[in-house]
Image (cartoon, rainbow, N blue to C red):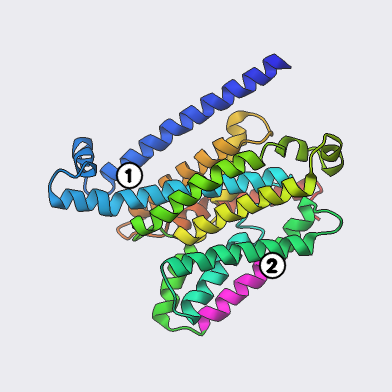
Amino acid sequence: MRAARRAGRGREVLVCALLSVVLVAVFAGTVCFSGRSVAPGEVLQAIGGGGNRATYYLVVELRLPRALTGVLIGLSFGLAGAVFQTLLRNPLASPDVIGISAGASAAAVVASVTLGVGGAAMSLSALGGALLAATLIYLLAWRRGVTGQRLVLIGVGVAAALTSVVSHTMTRSSAVVAQEARVWLTGSLNGRTWEQVGPLLIAVAVLFPLTALAARPLGALQLGDDAASGLGTRVERSRLALIGCAVALTGTATAAAGPVGFVAFVSGPIARQLLGRSTPALVPSALVGAVIVLVADLVAQHGLGPNQFPVGLVTSMIGAPYLLWLLARANRGGRGG
């Protein structure tokens, strides 16, 4: 058993190292070669405050905040999705499937269209909407405890209701406002600035350690409530702490770039495939999420013709077929209802 555990930890370290190398390479490529090429030496000069003014503006004001925002939201969505899927033992238990992202989107759109707010106020609205949606879903799913299947089903229903709120709000707004909201709802890194990077970086720096602490009893929780209680785990307190961290990660990421679809949904399964096991893979899932967002953003900028598209369009092209395949596999196994 000790040898198996050491081998598992060794493979996880190796996978995390390889994913980190890929992430750094994609990040460097995004900053250096996204559009007009800039030599790595010129990039370092611009970051240090040197070089010519045009290069400084291109690298420091345009590319760096966009790439950093992509990394941070990818880490957040990837970790949040892995927490939900592992905790609830359901591959569909992703924040963009069970209504958490829909709550953030609904609150942000209502605040933007109805109240005319933007910037930090809109971000706070998205975070508040995610928290309210999660609270509502949890209360509706509570029946002397919470099971993954019930929470997913209720979350899908709440997501549908919140989506109708978004549609109703947008139909009553002007064409210009509706178009801006539609781009944000798709999930976009266009126009990201240091104004979004700062709060998101602080949130990640606070929430990642909190999630790591809250995830300590995650292995016991995977065994079921009775088994976890028998092992001395405070089930409801631990579950609420983990859900709270995952919801906060989802809300802050959504506030920064909109609900970038399916990143949280596919990051966990990809990470577990890389590890070759079904145990919690929180750190690899976060790294996979960051890689997915950066690669998808590069494709959205340069791989779909002369026009730039929102990054959420590309991630949805990846995630939607996976969702259909997952549902088809469940039906073939007699678990689809």
Q: CA distance from mark 2 to mark 1?
A: 37 Å
Residue that badge 1 annotates: 30
Residue at horizontal 32 percent and vertical 60 percent from the top = 307
- Of residues 214 and 253, the one drawn nearer to the viewer in this rendering: 214
Residue 143 lies, with reference to residue 37, above or below; the image says below
The spot of residue 149 in percent (x, y) is: 78, 53
Rendered image: mark on residue 188? none
Residue 179 lies, with reference to residue 12, above or below; the image says below
Which amino acid, mark 2?
Val
Residue at disc 1, secondary structure: helix
Image quarter in which the C terminus is found: bottom right
Query: Image quarter for residue 174?
Result: bottom left
Rendered image: mark on residue 158? 2
Is residue 193 left or right of 243 when viewed as pictured?
left
Residue count near mark 1 (Cα–Cα under 10 Å), binned few <14, some 14–19, many ≥20: many
Q: Is residue 298 visible?
A: no
Segment tinted magenta in the rendering: 157-171
Residue 212 lies, with reference to residue 111, above or below; the image says above
- Residues under numbered marks 2 and 1 in contact, where contact means CB atoms less than 8 Å apart: no
Residue count near mark 2 (Cα–Cα under 10 Å), binned few <14, some 14–19, many ≥20: many
